[in-house]
Every structure is written in C-alpha cells, then in structure tokens.
Amino acid sequence: MSLRDLPKLELHLHLEGAAPPTFIRGLAKEKSIDISGVFREDGSYAFRDFVHFLSVYEAATSVLKTPEDYARLVTAVLEESAAQGVIYAETFVSPDFCGGSDVGAWREYLLAMQEAAARAEARDGIILRGIVTCIRHFGPEKARASALCAAETVGDFITGFGIAGDEGRGALRDFTWSFDLAREAGLRLTAHAGEWGGPQSVRDALDVLRVERIGHGVRAIEDLALVDRLAEDGVVLEVCPGSNVMLGLYPRWDRHPIQRLRERGVKVTVSTDDPPFFHTTMTREYEELARAFGWGAEDFLEISRNALDAAFCDGDTRDKIAEKLKDHPQ
Ligand code: MCF
Ligand code: ZN
C-alpha cells in the first residue's frame, strides 16, 4: 500500500499557509514587493517560534492583493493537495486578508476562490469548502466584521466559522458575539484551542464559544477528565502533528499525544495546518504516524471516517466522498 495513494480528508488547512514559497516569491517579484525577510537562504519560510511564525505568515500574505491572486493560490494549493491523495479539504479563509472585511470586496474574493475550486474539482475530483476564520490577535471588533462577512456568504462553499491566531492574546469570551452570529446564520463552528493554551482553553472553546470541533486540542491530554469528556461527547479534534512538532510543542513525533488521545476514545483527524511552513504534506503526516505509532491502512481509514463524519459539508457531498473512500482498495 502506498500512503500517497490513500484517499485523504483534510479539515485543518490555512489557505495562505499552504502557499508554496515559490508561489509567494513569484508574486512578490511580479509586484516588486520586498519580502526578503520571509525566506531562508534555501528558499523555505523562515521563522524562529510561534509568534514569529504568525508575523512571517502575515508578511507572506501581504503579496496577495486581488481576487485573481487568491484564485491562483487556490489552484496551486489544490493541485498539490490532490497530488497527495486528498479528496476533500476544508480551508480557513479570512476576510481580514481578502478585502479588509468589506462585504462587497469579500464577495469578489470568494467568487474567484470558488471558481478556482470548481475548476480543480472538475480536473482532479478534489472538493473544497471554506471556513471563515477570525484572527484572535486582531481583536474582537475585526472578528465581528469577519462574522458578518461569513453570515452574508454562508452557502455551498462557505460552511463554517472559526478562530485562529495567537492563543496567548485576549479571551475566548470576547468572541462570543461573533460565534453566536455565525451559529444563527447556519455556519458550523470550530476554534483553535489547546495548542498554546492548556486544557482550560479547550473547555472554553466548548462551553463559551460552543464549537463542535477543536483545531489542535492536543493539550487536552494534560487533563484526563477533559479527554473523557471529548470522547463521550464525540468532539472531533483537527490534529496537526507535524505542525506541533515543528513549532516545538512536542520534541519528537513519537512523543505526540495523538495516539494516547485515540486510545482513550477521542475522535481524531489528521491535517497539515500550513504545510510548506512546516515542511510537510498529508503523505508525510501519514508516513511519520506509521513510523511513530505503527499505523496502517485500518488506522488511516478510521481517521478518514472521523473526518467525513465531522466535515462541514452537506449530505450529498458526504455521500459522494463516502463512495470514493469505499471504492479504494485498502
Ligand atoms: O494553526 C497554526 C498555529 N496556531 C494558530 N494559528 C494559525 C496557524 N496557522 C495559521 N494561523 C493563523 C494565523 O494567525 O491563522 C491565520 C494566520 O494569520 C490565517 S486564517 C486564514
Ligand atoms: Zn491552524
């Protein structure tokens, strides 16, 4: 069995964070924008730690200026995802970067992204959905503007709302207005928590923001009562092991808690987060998990089923993906 060929679902992927460095460098050159500090000499993204990563992410994103740029980005990202066996992906998109939270501009960016995604689906069969994401360190006011953009554009493509960014800044309760609005508009909810914040941040995401999935959530392992709650309530974690190892949350793959969470009954899924930043791909995540924990075809199928059950898509799309999973010989 080739791990690359296994059909995969990815629920946690930041759109700009998936941009190949060559793509960002190319756009910077076209537009004569100097972002040299963003790259190492070998051409990869340069960052020292989590907070520096966030600022490098924003500097790289600064070259993406038009809906057409985002269409090209979606095309590049989905081409790579499809080459890694991904059949369904959800990507975080932010009105802060796409038109500065103006609803009219946001619609234009969205249209361009959706058209590019439709072309990729026609060509490679890969299906993409978008999760509008507010950025925690940009503050609650910007988050409200993002939630309004999300509520205005909920539909076939935009199906979820979430929060990412610096967990060290602000409190989740400052974002309840935005999450309540998004929920009322019919969006499905997820929040980054339990990455740089401890178990209490996961409890807050569940109790205060009332989300159904958790981005990362791995530090729940530090509180077994919380782990049992996640298992009992069927809360799905969007786990990104390579990202956690690269950002220094865990020193090595075999020290990552994904297997312990799973053994205690938590539904986990696997994603890349920001693949070129973390020198990873979905295939590499699978290879490292196979190496660290001995995972094989049955384990990966369980991961895909968890992702399918938790996907923010409609029933017809879910059935279509289920067929593709069934068709593949394990
Ligand atoms: O999951 C990783 C690390 N933890 C938190 N936030 C982010 C991660 N990758 C990107 N982000 C944030 C970052 O602030 O998401 C935003 C970035 O600006 C983009 S969402 C379209
Ligand atoms: Zn993330």
Image: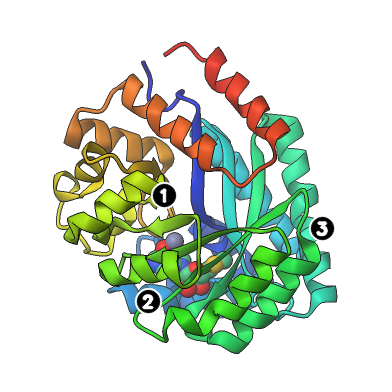
Q: Position of residue 180 (x, y in %)?
A: 62, 72
Spatial distance from mark 3 to mark 1, Cα to Cα? 32 Å
Tag in front: 2 or 3? 2
Q: Quadrant of the C terminus?
A: top left
User: Residue visible at 53% across and 87% down?
Assistant: 139
Q: Amino acid at mark 1?
A: Val
Q: Are marks 3 and 1 in contact (CB under 8 Å)?
A: no
312 to the left or right of 197:
right
Secondary structure of residue under mark 2? loop
Q: Which residue is mark 2?
A: 167
Left or right for 275, reference 60: left
| Residue 235 numbered mark, or none | 1
Which amino acid is tagged 2? Glu
Q: Is mark 2 within 8 Å of ligand 1?
A: yes
Q: Quadrant of residue 296?
A: top left
Q: Residues within 10 Å of mark 3 (few under 14, many from 20)?
A: some
Q: In the figure, is residue 227 to the left or right of 17?
A: left
Q: Which residue is mark 3?
A: 111
Q: How many marks?
A: 3
